[in-house]
Image (cartoon, helix red, strand yellow):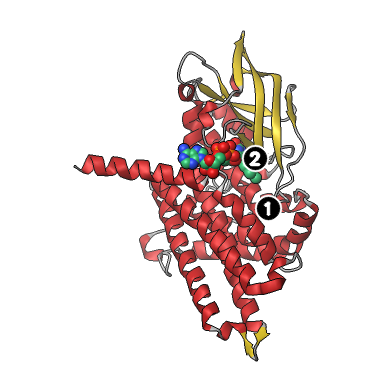
Amino acid sequence: MTVPAPAPTRAEDYRGPYGLSEDQDLFRRTVHEFVAREIVPTAHEYDESETFPRENVRKMAELGLLGLVVPEEYGGAGASTLDYVLAMEEVSWGCASHAVVMSVNNSLVCEPIHRFGTDEQRREHLPRLAAGEYIGSYCLSEPTSGSDASNMATTARREGVDWVLNGTKSWISNGGEAGLYLVYAVSNTGVPKARGITAFLVHADNPGLRTGAKERKLGIRASATTQVFLEDCRVPSSAVLGRVDEGFKIAMSTLDGGRIGIASQALGIAQRALDETIRYSKERVAFGHPIAEFQGLQWRMADMATRIEAARLLIYRAARMKDAGQPYAKEASMAKLFASETANFCAHAAVQTFGGYGYVRDYPVEKLFRDAKITEIYEGTSEIQRLVISRHILREVARSK
Ligand SMILES: Cc1cc2nc3c(=O)[nH]c(=O)nc-3n(C[C@H](O)[C@H](O)[C@H](O)COP(=O)(O)OP(=O)(O)OC[C@H]3O[C@@H](n4cnc5c(N)ncnc54)[C@H](O)[C@@H]3O)c2cc1C
């Protein structure tokens, strides 16, 4: 079963506090019901055993969630960025590990293939990525370069009509599970690194590509994170995505879009933390009263709810700007920065509200607390988001003078 993407919104359809159409609201609710039915009951076990949730990922693909942003002509749902963030929030509400798979596949792999790929590359990969026949992974970070991504050591050397890749990629989400690796490598050492990097689409079974052991993580423990080793990995020139030496632009512009997705992952975690907090504080009695009656806790819940609404509005704004074809890098960074800090604030508050029960694995908020942290780290740490935002605003001020 595939959920059809909502029809493009018309002005007269707009309703509710977020200006969503009826179709979008129905779409959001359909994804929520799927998540409550299929993901929530199994998320704890996958997390506990640190097992990649293959069966649930298959069901997510069936519903169309792995190819939401892929145009219909390539087998996807043809959804807007706004539709995508609605779904990302719901899946993350159920389990942030499942959301990683969806976000990497949609934002970090399908999007750049669609934007920068040849028609042949699109036809080869997009239908399969959308159907979940295989999933993708995005290989930028390395042991000695994360935030400073262009300072990578992986090389791509031309040999006849082929390219030969050598190097190590770190922290690769979907590592070991993916069928396709989008690998960035230095192809030209005669220019500053950011102008000499090329992107390559490498099949998992390509000789010379090998993945390492699964990292043992604080949170999103069901997701697969591994190193990727490229050892004389020979690929044909048809594996180049976009233009030779222009891969870093692909990497950076892809992350702008990805950040809106991670912001909505954070939003889902924050919303779940608030929902659990409200439910528990009405049930738990102390000093003869449900703890929800204590003003100190009410104020904390009000702070959680207000930050969540602000995060949601920032995310929807960034998504709408992307959909409208406007520059949105600053807005995406603001959304990610604020939403990820909101997720951590809310998960922390939820654990505090649960008291001792918040500290043990039998209750859901302990997992939220662990899962929230990654949203402040990947696809650009909070420090890097502040750097991006400040660069933009300083430039804007300079221009307005
Ligand atoms: C679970 C997980 C999944 C991931 N998935 C992927 C993936 O799929 N693909 C991929 O390519 N990468 C992935 N990453 C890598 C992730 O994007 C990097 O960890 C992140 O960008 C930070 O890089 P780093 O770890 O090298 O930290 P560093 O860059 O070494 O940063 C260390 C600290 O210094 C700060 N810092 C660095 N530069 C500055 C500066 N100029 N100003 C102020 N502070 C600064 C950082 O904010 C951070 O606090 C993943 C990481 C994790 C943990």
Q: Circle 2 sits on which residue?
A: 129
Q: Which quarter of the image is occupied by the N terminus?
A: bottom right
Q: Position of residue 157 (x, y in %)?
A: 60, 14
Q: Position of residue 274 (x, y in %)?
A: 57, 70
Q: Measure the alpha-carbon separation of dots 2 and 1.
A: 25 Å
**In this rendering, would 122 be left or right of 17?**
right
| Residue type at numbered disc 2 | Leu
Give the farthest residue toward the top.
160
Residue at 56% across, 63% down: 270
| Residue type at numbered disc 1 | Gly
Q: Position of residue 278 (x, y in %)?
A: 59, 76
Q: Which mark is residue 219?
A: 1
**In this rendering, would 216 be left or right of 194?**
right
Q: Which quarter of the image is occupied by the C terminus?
A: top left
| Nearest to the observer: residue 99 or residue 364 | 364
**Does ligand 1 reach within 8 Å of label 2's beta carbon?**
no
**Label located before the other in sequence (2 or 1):** 2
